[in-house]
Image (tube, helix red, strand yellow):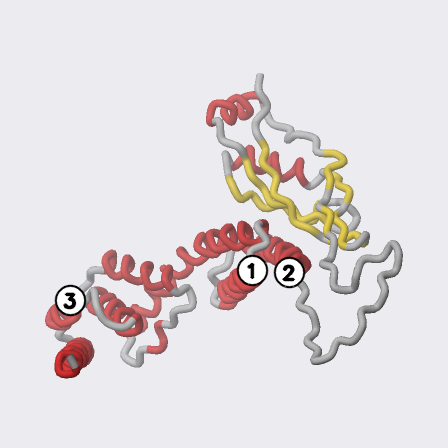
Amino acid sequence: MKSLAVIIAIAGAVGVAAQDDSLTTARDLYASAAYEEALVQLARGDSTGSPTALRDRAAYRAFCLVALGRVDEAQTIAESLLRADPLFSIEQYADVAPRIVALFAEVRTRVLPPLIKNEYRLARAHALENAPDAESRLSHVRDLIDFAQQIGASDPTLADLRLLVDGFADLAHAAAPRGAAASADPGPAAPATSGSPPASAAARIIPAVAVAQPPPNVAPDLLELVRRLRLPSEIDITINEHGTVDNVVVTRSVNPAYDRAVVAAARAWRYEPATKDGVPIRSVKTVVINAPGR
């Protein structure tokens, strides 16, 4: 059995070495402008190898395709790499031509905003479920928004999204269980004061309650269209400590004109603000709006 294990280990090591050699060969071929030959090398062992090796193979395949004028194929690979890792840096490769850097920048600008919005929807769902990873997911979305702004890949909707991320992060933090302080000898418990919650009790959060939510003011023809589409509009609103709406983001669009009417209506809505232990706080609320029937 030991001999068999040794043989398997050696075979695995040889396989890894062969993959590394083929990648090294492909790099050398790319550097010498032998792009077709480099693509042949990169095609070997595509489905195996470490995540880093697979990423490098994909990157060099994109480099070769750009050099050969097959830009559409290169863009597809670049999009796949950036979806897998939005923070992927093309500058880590020393032999990257300026046109490749420009291609990845263009793809990132196109891909990043919708990718961030999708990450936000997932993080929001986790926050609404009080999932333990909600804060980390929201923090990741915040980092992506900051990164998009730094590289010029942001758009106006991401600025609004940042406010919502902060609002959900506050809720996730407030809802997180409070850990008890560790102590070797905690001593006798202090008597509870009548009418006061124990010191270890979680904060009590009461969601915002609608006071006035007038429907959107929509032209009859547009309203008829929305009825026929049978699609609800969905928005996330940020409600401040005074019960007024600070921000509105459309998370499920129906029609641009209808979306604008929904946003305008939502900005005028009024609420009893959410409270934490009786103190008004900012909160985020998801609202689904169905078009009224006839």
Q: Position of residue 34 (x, y in %)?
A: 13, 74
* Residue drawn 66% across the image and 68% down it: 179
Residue 111 picture quarter: bottom left
Q: What residue did someone put label 2 on?
A: 176
Q: Position of residue 5 (x, y in %)?
A: 17, 79
Image: 244 above or below 255: below
Q: What residue did someone put label 1 on?
A: 132
Q: What residue did someone put label 3 on?
A: 43
Q: CA distance from mark 1 to mark 2?
A: 7 Å
Position of 52 compared to 15: left or right?
right
Q: Position of residue 90 (x, y in %)?
A: 35, 72
Crowding around mark 3 (Cα neighbors within 10 Å: few <14, some 14 to 19, many 20+) is some
Q: Quadrant of the N terminus?
A: bottom left
Q: Residue furthest right?
A: 194
Which residue type does callout 2 highlight?
Ala
Image: 27 above or below 202: below
Does residue 206 appear in the picture of this structure?
A: yes
Judge by depth and name the residue closer to the eye, 235 or 66: 235
